[in-house]
Amino acid sequence: MKAIKLKFITPKTALYIVAAFIIISSCKTDGIDKTKITSSMDIPAHVEMKAILTSPPNVPPPTADRVAKKLIVDMEILEQEGELTNGVKYVYWTFGGTVPGSFIRTKIGDEVEFHLKNHPDNKLPHNIDLHAVTGPGGGAESSFVAPGHEKVFSFKVLNPGLYVYHCATAPVGMHIANGMYGLILVEPEEGLSPVDKEYYVMQGDFYTKGKHGDRGLQPFDMQKAVDEDADYVVFNGSVGALTGDNALTANVGETVRLYVGNGGPNLVSSFHVIGEIFDKVHVEGGDLINENVQTTLIPAGGAAIVEFKVEVPGSFILVDHSIFRAFNKGALGMLKVEGEENEKVYSGEQRDDIYLPEGGGIQTMPSTNEIPESEIPAKSMAERMEFGKQIYMQTCFACHLGEGQGIAHAFPPLANSDYLNADVTRAIDIVLNGKSGEITVNGEKYNSVMTAQNLSDEEIANVLTYVYNSWGNSKKEVTPAMVKAVRSGN
Ligand code: HEC
Ligand SMILES: [Cu+2]
């Protein structure tokens, strides 16, 4: 679709090429004629280059003095199970397989050609809103992509700074709460000043059906999310992502730069490193530089760049200084600094165990109601309902919502649905194989796509039983045998 770029060279760009060429050949610099460029919009970006993306806590190499390019960003959305903390599983929705998503590093004037792929095994459509984009929805409107599809859109980065990106598919809060956020850096023309260590840290709050520490696979809890009652507040997607063997490292005398983001969805971060003072903070990720800062506020959907020199060895603890979040909900990371003591700066007995997280241990007794594996057959109607509700909340909820009310013009209701109640076999077939094309539910027309749900016979039986016995529906029990019959085409 986006074909050979040379076709689109305008007289103005051609002029820049010529100008650049003259300067290169006359002054032997590889710069471009900056006097001709009055706004970042006019920075030419001819040469194509594939962006290096990195997983947290790593960041791609500096853009240094490279000129603006056409930057190809290839990002794949993956829905996958991970560990929120020891023994607690969570299904994350990710940009690139990690929370936060892959770090994107650009230079002002870059023309980014963004390829957003939604893995075929995923269950939901997604999109991306990059705060670095000037344009409708920050790209969200052009990037809505169904499982098994790829969308391509382009934008020019006009403003330097550190920006959040996130999914903006309804229900937006839920997509963000499940981990769909990350950072994109737009470096100024001269690049950021060189430092010794750079790291990528991003805070996020998580909401689970069980309490903090309750074991097993924990589904997302919409009500807690609405109430802003987080069970976990973490850096880089899980408790302990930046502690122990995962700690950040530096050597005495080095300068450290942290790119710190906050995906939210709800909480504002009071970002602090215990035992350090930020020499420099790029406030809110923008141009304003503050110096000698103890704690910097990072809004949900915002970022900051903090820089400091490490003068003495030891463990420096990254926290959200809303301190129960650090010691009881997980918002705690570690920077381990090695090297010579410097008694002029700090002379004191050192303990390694001073700031160990307290975790949720004090709040929870060994759990008596572990969430059962979805494959254990339901032994009663009550169990079928209970298991079915869990599947519903994990799988169907995102589109059909908590009370089966759906979303107008997009996702049909399952509550009191005449379409559902008219035909059980058809309903089983829809969950098994997906559905597209026009249908009429309770007098409203829908013409959209529901992807196949990749569930077992037992799971489909449970979820449909739950749906049929909720919200005014016709109270049928769907059994695994019925699903099996539809699956095998009988
Ligand atoms: C990615 C969003 C999405 C998810 C997840 C999803 N559906 Fe759907 N569903 C749709 C859409 C869109 C339609 C309408 C399809 C069309 O227009 O042809 C639909 C239609 C239906 C219908 C028929 C219409 C009606 O309202 O009665 C049923 C039944 C249904 N879905 C059940 C489920 C169940 C059960 C789950 C979970 C196992 C689920 N869906 C998960 C999007 C989704
Ligand atoms: Cu999403």
Image (cartoon, grey):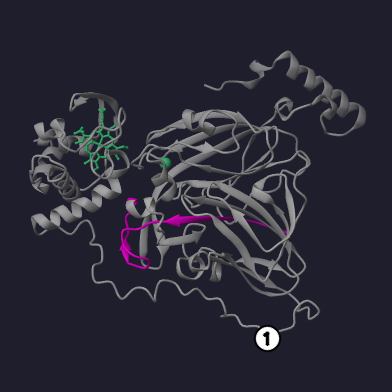
Quarter holding residue 113: top right
Of 244 and 446, the residue lying toward us: 446
Judged left or right of residue 366, residue 35 is right
Judged left or right of residue 332, residue 411 is left
Q: Looking at the image, can residue 437 be seen?
A: yes
In terms of image quarters, where does ligand 2 lie?
A: top left
The disc labelled 1 sits on which kind of residue? Glu
Which residue is at the far right?
Answer: 26
Of 446 and 253, the residue lying toward us: 446
Residue at position x 36%, y 60% in the image? 89
Residue 77 in the image, given as x and y percentages of width and height: 45, 42
Please give the range of residues in magenta.
196-222
Disc 1 is placed on an element classified as: loop
Say few, some or many: other residues with alpha carbon within 10 Å of mark 1 (under 14 / 14 to 19 / 20 or more).
Answer: few
Residue 419 in the image, given as x and y percentages of width and height: 15, 30
Task: Reply yes or no: does residue 169 show up in magenta.
Answer: no
Of 134 and 74, the residue lying toward us: 134
Judged left or right of residue 213, residue 98 is right
Q: Mark 1 points at which residue?
A: 349
Residue at position x 36%, y 64% in the image? 88
